[in-house]
Image (cartoon, rainbow, N blue to C red):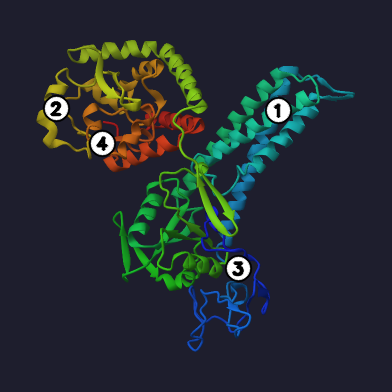
Amino acid sequence: MGADIHARLLPGGSALDAFPPAAGADIDGMQLTTDPRPLTAGPLRTLPAEADTVTADRRVAAPAALPAQSFVFPSFTTRRPFARTGHPRSAAVAWNRKYARIITAADALVVFAAALAGHLVWFGLAPAPLKIGSFTTTYLVVSAVVGCAWMLALHVYRSRDPRITGIGTDEYKRVINASVVLLGSLALATVVFQFDVSRGYFGLVFPTGVGGLICSRWLLRQWLQAQRQRGRYLSKVVVLGRPRDVRYVVHQINAKSRAAYQVVGVVLTGKKREYLDVDGTRLPVVADERKVVDAAARLRVDAVIVAGPTKGGSRYVQELGWELEESSTQLILTTGLTNVAGPRIHSRPVEGLPLMHVELPQYAGGKHVLKRGLDIVLSGAALVALVPVFLLLAVLVRRDSPGPALFRQERVGRGGEVFEMLKFRSMVQTAEDDLAGLLDRNEGSGVLFKMQQDPRVTRVGRWMRKYSLDELPQLWNVFLGHMSLVGPRPPLPREVAQYGNRVHRRLYIKPGLTGMWQINGRSELNWKDGVRLDLYYVENWSLAGDLIILWRTVQMLRRPVGAY
């Protein structure tokens, strides 16, 4: 099929769609025939007017005893004259394949370099023998085998899939998962075949290789994002749906600087209009829902994104997929599960019925034990390493304004438990008493109070806030277990008192020193977006995701956004 349907969400399909029976075939007492007349319009094409009992979007089955009714299978209909070989999307396909080849070459370089470096460090230049039963080989051969197996694992885990490379965390997760599974398989092989392998050698090769793979993917991603910011290597798309749904999808695409799509037009259902305003930009309405395929061919788009439910329902989407079969245009469906991460969604077709299984979030268990262990190790190491920085900042705060160096404030943690959070004092000592006189100048949204030019902030406090240095004492809260390194923003009791039922889900896990809120704009986010990001993290967090958030936090400290 030429149309690539993302997420395999094509409702309304059946076994008959994929394997249409021949004309006149008898199925369970029903006889099917094929109407030889071509379709004349498009998705949703219709037959000539005189065929009032047959439409392109209807399969008609009649008992064998009755006169056979006309039946049209999409596979037998006349298609639009798409020239597959000359379709403009071939350029997009070409750079996708080129980027995949670049990633493959970089992976091979890193993997074999790590294997060779491990051999040189552990064994030197001399060949190191390894006996496996009655067979003797060398670690150079083992290095080559490990390298090939590693490349195969990366391929099997689809770590170079164009749909995940260059955006999101799935690419890194698949690299890590493939490497861990390979290491486990090798460890199992040593037990099964009973040969003694150098643990020090593998202890060097795998950490070096995984670190190198992550770094090479990150560097390639930086290059790709720089190209996309110049308007290159973007997939041109048309978004179809109701105005509200289209606005949401386009906003999300535009809000993510790393998005791989360029919206060139929209197709709206309902009331006709010439353009749609999205975030101050006018997007042209390029067609109505009946002429989507014509617009896709005319604009040379790479994909049609269906945003939310359509007027024709699953039947419309099914026929739209049929119409796109002859082109290389992809069909992408949004699920509406905006706060559910991809790894929690599993597609499982049952007799032509596409079912989506959504894993429920877990708020206890082994993952949380590992998260706590990571918190203790990293926060403890940071507390020891940053002692000189703490002393310097404490002196600067005390000299800048009267009052203690540390500011203590009650915050609400997991399950509504109140704890005392530590910060370096960045405001005058009377800040809490002065708040009442500033409420009418609040620039924040929702229950948050924020002022970009807050008169209570001290001179030292202003630049500490810019680089988040005032929050370093919270490492002690992390070490004690009140907070985690990564999590939702720790709220004040007065904020929690105004929470709705949905927002209370932020309290299902420990608040974090950093999190989705901090790496996506901080105070520049409105209340609704901040809640959405926190709830997304609560339900979809992972250890690999936490490490990526920590890394992005370090990047944000170099180029702070929304910190005041």
Residue plotted at (40% across, 71% down): 287
**First in sequence: mark 3 vs mark 4:** 3
- Could you tell me how far apart the alpha carbons at marks 3 and 4 are, in whole angstroms? 56 Å
Q: Amino acid at mark 3?
A: Gly
Residue plotted at (41% across, 44% down): 339
Within 10 Å of disc 4 (Cα), the crowding (few <14, some 14-19, many 20+) is: some
Contact (Cβ within 8 Å) of mark 2 with mark 4: no
Q: Is residue 546 visible?
A: yes
Instruction: Tell us which disc is closer to us: 3 or 2.
Output: 2
Residue plotted at (53% across, 40% down): 170
Q: Which residue is mark 4?
A: 499
| Quadrant location of the C terminus in the rendered image | top left
Within 10 Å of disc 1 (Cα), the crowding (few <14, some 14-19, many 20+) is: many
Of helix, strand and loop, which one carries label 2?
helix
Q: Which mark is residue 435?
A: 2
Pinpoint residue 369: horizontal percent, then vertical percent: 49, 23
Q: Which mark is residue 86?
A: 3
**First in sequence: mark 2 vs mark 4:** 2
Of helix, strand and loop, which one carries label 1?
helix
Residue plotted at (31% across, 26% down): 416
In the image, residue 232 sits, relative to residue 498, either above or below, namely: below
Pinpoint residue 214: horizontal percent, then vertical percent: 56, 33
Instruction: Tell us which disc is closer to us: 1 or 4.
Output: 4
Q: Residue furthest right?
A: 134
Pinpoint residue 105: horizontal percent, then vertical percent: 66, 41
